Image: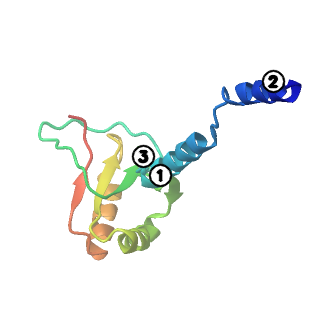
Amino acid sequence: MKSGLMKKRDDDENTGEIDLTPMLDVVFILLIFFIVTSVFVTEAGIDVNKPDASTAQPRSQDLILIAVSGDGQIWIDGEQIDARFIRSRFERRLAETPNASVVIQGDQAAENQHVLRILEAARDANIASVSISTEN
């Protein structure tokens, strides 16, 4: 009779435990799902003072952001590039996203010749949509 009492006590102690392994598996699967499906915004690489415009409209498609600083530096995908390689960079990005459009983030102090180089490179790379980013 003593062995029956011992066995009952062991069963009572085990009934209060909850197995958290399936819940942790679900949490990790959800975490992986959200990481894989998240969209990362790529910035051109520098902050520029954009000019004001009354006709500014937001863009919500695949964008190739390129920035021109006030002293003529050109940045794309977080790195400074030479003006001679803009077209090849556009063509490489178009291979990844064929319907992408270019958004030029030109500083107010940037010279027009730098923006025109980017427009020419976009035309040579057969990019259909080119916009200039402004403050609304």
Foreground pick, 122 / 99: 99
Q: Residue at x 31, y 53 (%)?
A: 104
Tell me the residue that label 2 is attached to.
5
Foreground disc of the pair 1, 2: 2
Q: Name the kind of residue labelled 2 in the image.
A: Leu
Choose the circle earlier in sequence order: 2 or 3: 2
The three-letter code of the residue at mark 3 reads Ser
Task: Give the structural element (helix, strand or loop) at label 2.
Answer: helix
Disc 1 residue crowd, few under 14, some 14–19, many 20+, Cα 10 Å = few
Q: Amino acid at mark 1?
A: Phe
User: In the rendered view, would you say 19 is above or below 26?
Assistant: above
Q: Rounded to the nearest whole Å, what is the CA distance between mark 2 and mark 3?
A: 82 Å
The relative height of residue 42 versus residue 109 in the rendered view (above or below) is below
In the foreground, 60 or 134:
60
Q: Which residue is mark 3?
A: 69
Q: Nearer the viewer, mark 3 or mark 1?
A: 1
